[in-house]
Image: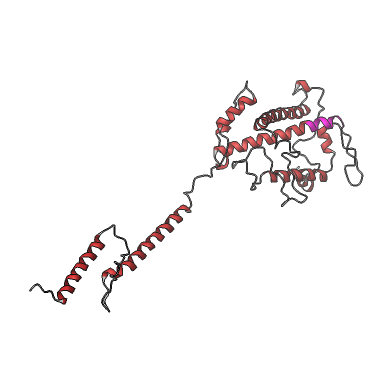
């Protein structure tokens, strides 16, 4: 009595170990890998695998797979395309409020004047901001063309011309002092060259490059992209700022210069149209009567010969 056999000792040890295993598996704070006690390594019976032996190998693998899958799903969601919008939005553009503020600087007396409500239009399905960029660029560009035309009209009306020959065969520049009539005396080959250059400049101004955004896509209205030496032989050329005067100016000076340019462009557009109107209808501009000579030609027909009417006289 009081003596325990070896069989009873093993039975009690097994029960105690079973209770410890159950406690370990049921405890959520227990580590996934159970460390053996010092000098008491686990020795399962030969040919037998317990549930405790399977847990450290299968459960961590399953959790790692779940974590990797969750990471991949999150990464894919980060690079997934956003929902398609009705139209493309621009990064930086002017709004109607910006036009109202600029109008006060351009002409404090008239202020903002938009009888056609173009400031709220959306051309070609683009946004209102993109449309404002188009209108701003168009005004600046046509103002520059009008300033060149106004000055050119005065130069030709005073008989100023280049001293060298106009053509390779030695033909000199015409001596006509009525600017539109002077244009009619120029050969069509020369006119094709002029319009070809204008067409190329127009094409180049519409490009978007890594250093130049389009004026309808966040770019600066009126800015002309510099010629890149990678595309244009002969090296880079910046027509927007050929002498580098603008890049060192302050933002306040640039803003003041833009106001002056727009006002001068608007005045030049009125001036050149005044010249053309007076040349077609005497007295149309009383201040120019007797100063601007009459012109019997067609301003909308820049070429001397029409390839259609020349080949098909019945259509003339």
Task: Determine the main secondary structure of the stretch shown in magenta.
Answer: helix
Image side of residue 90 versus residue 180, left or right: left
Of the 4 image quadrants, the one containing the N terminus is bottom left
Q: In this view, does 227 lie above or below 46?
A: above
Seen from this angle, which residue lies furthest front? 2
Which residue is found at the position 76% from the left and 49% from the top? 235
Displayed quadrant of residue 109: top right
Image side of residue 3 versus residue 40, left or right: left
The answer to whether residue 178 is visible is: no
Which residue is found at the position 58% from the left and 27% from the top? 101
140 or 44, which is in the foreground? 44
Which residue is found at the position 79% from the left and 34% from the top? 297
180 or 313, which is in the foreground? 180
Read off the magenta span.
Answer: 151-159
Q: In this view, does 292 lie above or below 134?
A: above
Seen from this angle, which residue lies furthest right? 170
Of the 4 image quadrants, the one containing the C terminus is top right
Q: In this view, does 74 lie above or below 3?
A: above
Displayed quadrant of residue 190: top right
Image side of residue 155 versus residue 51, left or right: right
Q: Does the magenta segment cover residue 88?
A: no
Seen from this angle, which residue lies furthest left? 1
Q: Coloured how?
A: secondary structure
The answer to whether residue 257 is visible is: yes
Expressed as whole percent of the image width and height from the top left, the position of residue 128 reads: 55, 37
203 or 4, which is in the foreground? 4
Count of picture labels: 0
Displayed quadrant of residue 161: top right
Q: Does the magenta segment cover residue 156?
A: yes
Expressed as whole percent of the image width and height from the top left, the position of residue 191 reads: 80, 43
Expressed as whole percent of the image width and height from the top left, the position of residue 155 reads: 83, 31
């Amino acid at each position: 009595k009081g003596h325990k056999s070896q069989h009873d000792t093993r039975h009690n040890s097994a029960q105690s170990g079973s209770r410890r295993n159950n406690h370990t598996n049921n405890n959520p704070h227990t580590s996934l890998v159970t460390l053996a006690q010092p000098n008491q390594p686990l020795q399962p019976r030969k040919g037998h695998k317990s549930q405790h032996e399977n847990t450290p190998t299968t459960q961590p693998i399953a959790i790692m797979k779940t974590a990797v899958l969750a990471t991949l799903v999150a990464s894919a969601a980060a690079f997934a395309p956003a929902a398609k919008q009705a139209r493309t939005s621009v990064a930086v553009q002017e709004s109607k409020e910006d036009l109202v503020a600029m109008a006060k600087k351009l002409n404090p007396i008239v202020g903002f004047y938009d009888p056609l409500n173009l400031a709220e239009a959306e051309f070609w399905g683009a946004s209102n901001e993109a449309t404002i960029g188009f209108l701003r660029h168009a005004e600046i560009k046509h103002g520059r063309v009008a300033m060149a035309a106004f000055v050119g009209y005065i130069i030709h009306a005073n008989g100023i011309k280049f001293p060298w020959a106009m053509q390779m065969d030695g033909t000199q520049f015409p001596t006509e002092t009525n600017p539109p009539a002077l244009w009619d005396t120029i050969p069509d080959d020369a006119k094709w060259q002029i319009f070809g250059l204008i067409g190329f400049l127009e094409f180049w101004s519409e490009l978007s490059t890594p250093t130049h955004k389009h004026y309808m896509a966040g770019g600066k209205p009126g800015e002309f992209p510099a010629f890149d030496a990678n595309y244009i032989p002969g090296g880079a050329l910046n027509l927007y700022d050929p002498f580098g005067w603008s890049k060192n100016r302050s933002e306040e000076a640039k803003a003041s210069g833009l106001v002056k340019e727009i006002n001068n462009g608007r005045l030049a557009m009125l001036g050149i149209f005044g010249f053309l109107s007076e040349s077609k209808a005497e007295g149309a501009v009383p201040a120019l009567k007797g100063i601007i000579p009459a012109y019997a030609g067609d301003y909308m027909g820049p070429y001397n010969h029409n390839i259609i009417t020349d080949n098909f006289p019945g259509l003339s």
